[in-house]
Amino acid sequence: MKKFSDIEILEKICVKKMQRLESKGFNLGYKIPESRETPLITPFILQEFTQDSNCKFIESTLKDSKEFIESNSKDSIIKSIKSSKNCNNFIESKIENSQDNSPLILKSHPFPPFENKSANYPVNFNENIESKTDCIKNKKQPFIIAEIKRASPTAGNISEILDPINLAKTYVKQGASAISVLCEEDYFKGSLSDLQSVKNALPHACVLRKDFILDPKEIEISYKMGADMVLLIAAIFLRDFKTFKAIFEAILSYKMTPLIEIHDLKEYEFIATLGISNLQKALLGINSRNLRTFKINAMDTMRLKAMMPTRFPVIFESGIECAFDSFSAASSGFSGILCGSYLVKNLDSKSKSSVLNDLKNAFLKGSENNFLEKIVRKFVTKNNIIESKGEISTEDSKNTNFIESKLQNSQDFIESKIQKPLIKICGINNLDFLAESIKQGADLLGFILTKKSPRYIDFEFLKKANEIIESTLQDSIESKSSKNTNLVKNIQSSKNYNFELDSKLNKNNLDSKLKSSKIPNFFRPIRVGVVTQDCIDFGLKCLESKLLDCLQLHDTPLEFVLDSIESSEIFYNNINLNSANFAFYPSLNTPFQTLKTQKLQDRFILFDSSGGSGETLDIESIKIFLQNNEIFKKNLWLAGGISAQNLGQILSLNPMLIDICSALESSKGIKDIKKLKEFFKTFKNYYKIIK
């Protein structure tokens, strides 16, 4: 049995590291200072999340306690706070030290600095953070971790990095929020000496010790050598939670910040055992590289992020190869990125390059439009409520092994046995059809923006469409609220009525949401503009006008998604897609007969066999394609002749998204509400939903 991990490369690295520890000690043969010689820096991203949490708590507390504060003296308030089980000594001291006659004012303070265990240096926050008078409304800055990395098992030798200090200074100059220093010696060619020299040269930078930490005794060494953050890889400890927790607690005891790295849902469930309160003291990172195959899969990384609570910051690790990758990470809800190989290749010997600054700017733009997060969270939410499968025709059952008599609630989704796809209704050019699409449950709404299509719509139609979307959604919420009110009345009139249940129902009903004109995000369909190269400017105008959430680039160049192509410039009209800073996903119109032997990159891609012509998909070619591109087995987006008649075959491929257009028309470009209803009725017969 392997000592650390069933993952071969991880086991090799850890065994080699343990041999070094046993032969050279926890200092790995380096001279360690008696005490820390540099200030301890807390990553500002934790400060921002703490501020958000504190502000929301204080807002709630002030609202609930207004009468109490107005009707009681300051002494009685202090006495009440001290007697509370949740008394915060920091707030208490602030109150006690205030002048007797001064008014009692609660302000949104960050958590106070802790005392260091082994030094008198204060805990300073990164200088990039600005003071905020309204910490909830202000936009967060991206947390960019730039890495000093000479080599890796996957990339081999990347760069000698003869002067790590100079590279670190370049990173900081271009806006890095933290510096990651590889310290593993055998596979990554790093050292503790690199960590110490970088921190000594840049004492006010936030520095991460990126290493394969195996023992709590390594943490004191990390602290004294200048680390502000320490990487903790969950996959190493899946059979040893005790050691994992001991290392985590040791990091916190030195007031450093753990960066906990996970790869999948199993690892997240493992670290979740620490509890939310502990996880909020750490940064979480999701590494998009599969350590078994070494393949990058950003799609699964985004899906995992969507399953996690939003109350703590999560970093996107590995796979950043261009500015659009950074944009996509931000758009899928991440708080920052960790980037190594790409930056080293471009900045170690080419200091004039601005790639890090480009990544930061792209991340900022991506955080303004979280369309990928909306799509993936909508998908995750939709699949957490599947319970069982409806009846399927004998003809469909012959075509697939997909059909099962029952589903095991959401567990099948988690294990990817079966999933309920998002539905995109495309080519909408009729307002009544649009309203009915929303009522039926369309997840995405597609509008064709090229004049070459019989389904073309102009700017004015799109404005009216948005008005219809808002009014239809509002009607839907009111309807749901009415049903909820009737449910409460029925329960109250029943013999088994109890007040505890009543309070929960009233707490969760939608009436309060009706008082606001803002429609909850989980109700909103995603608005997609389908463009061709000749109308991309019109699409961008619609995006900037907030009439669309994203663009679908019809007939995207195949080079943009091929894994074998490494080019910094791939154009769609006059736009370099690798540096694009707007929300889009590629749409390939290449037949699966051609694609089935190709290796594609880890991007969400709509595979469209027809482009609205109604030409059906080649099921057998898709199956061969999936065998060669396993990353798409759970992430398949399909378009092309999908209808109620062939739906069983399409669902047998277990897609994440299906796009329906021509099958919902009485003639080309003429939408048919009757066919729309028929399609959704057929689709819903495949699934029984628990609400």
Image (cartoon, helix red, strand yellow):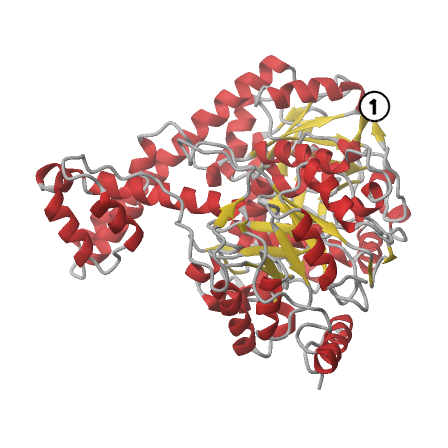
Q: Is residue 547 above or below residue 213?
A: above
Extreme-front residue of the structure? 34
**In the picture, which quadrant includes the N terminus?**
bottom right
Location of residue 182 by image quarter: bottom right
Could you say where residue 98 lies in the image, as x and y percent from the top left? 22, 41
Residue at mark 1: 573
Dot 1 amino acid type: Asn
Regarding residue 651, the answer to whether it shows in the image is no
Extreme-top residue of the structure? 460
Nearest the camera: 168 or 364?
Answer: 168
At 28% across and 42% down in the image, what residue appears? 60
Could you say where residue 541 lies in the image, as x and y percent from the top left? 66, 18
At 83% across and 22% down in the image, what residue appears? 574
Could you say where residue 235 lies in the image, as x and y percent from the top left? 64, 69
Nearest the camera: 512 or 492?
Answer: 512
Q: Is residue 399 above or below residue 360?
A: below
- How many numbered circles does the render carry? 1
- Label 1: which secondary element: loop
At 52% across and 74% down in the image, what residue appears? 246
